[in-house]
Amino acid sequence: MARKKYRVNWGPAGAFTLPRLLMAHEDFRELSGSAMRVLMALGYQHNGRNNGDLSATHKTMEAWGGMSHTTLARALRELQERLLMAK
């Protein structure tokens, strides 16, 4: 007999989930703190209808604790090099 899949209704706020396969990958586990914060900010913006229309600008990151321009640039470069963000 098939197991019943339980669905969680997160309401209009939705949810951002990370696949275990991604979390087990070395590139993800070795991310710097600033790169992880940028990745979380990008995931927060995704709502199911805006795939590909995400941004991590200096102004956007102010709501996530602030980040200098050079740190943001370094974090974005790190995500791109690890192929966790499109170029």
Image (cartoon, rainbow, N blue to C red):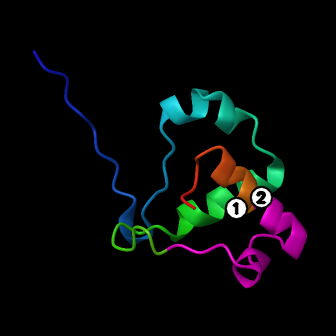
Mark 2 is surrounded, within 10 Å at the Cα level, by few (under 14), some (14 to 19) or many (20 or more) other residues, namely many
Q: Amino acid at mark 1?
A: Val
* Residue extending farthest top: 1
- Whether residue 72 appears in magenta in the rendering, the answer is yes
Residue bearing the label numbered 2: 75
Report x, y in % for residue 70. Answer: 89, 69
Tag on residue 38?
1
Left/right placement of residue 63 relative to residue 48 reads right
Boundaries of the magenta span: 54-75
- Tell me the mark number nearer the camera, choosing from 1 and 2: 2
Local secondary structure at mark 2: helix
Q: Nearer the viewer, residue 79 or 50?
A: 79
Please report the residue visible at 74 percent of the width from the left and 84 percent of the height from the top. 59
Q: Position of residue 19 (x, y in %)?
A: 47, 38
Front in this rendered view, residue 44 or 10: 44
Residue sitting at 49 percent across and 29 percent down?
Answer: 21
Q: Which three-letter amino acid code belongs to the residue tagged 2?
A: Ala
The answer to whether mark 1 and mark 2 are in CB contact below 8 A is yes
Q: Check residue 33 for magenta coloring.
A: no
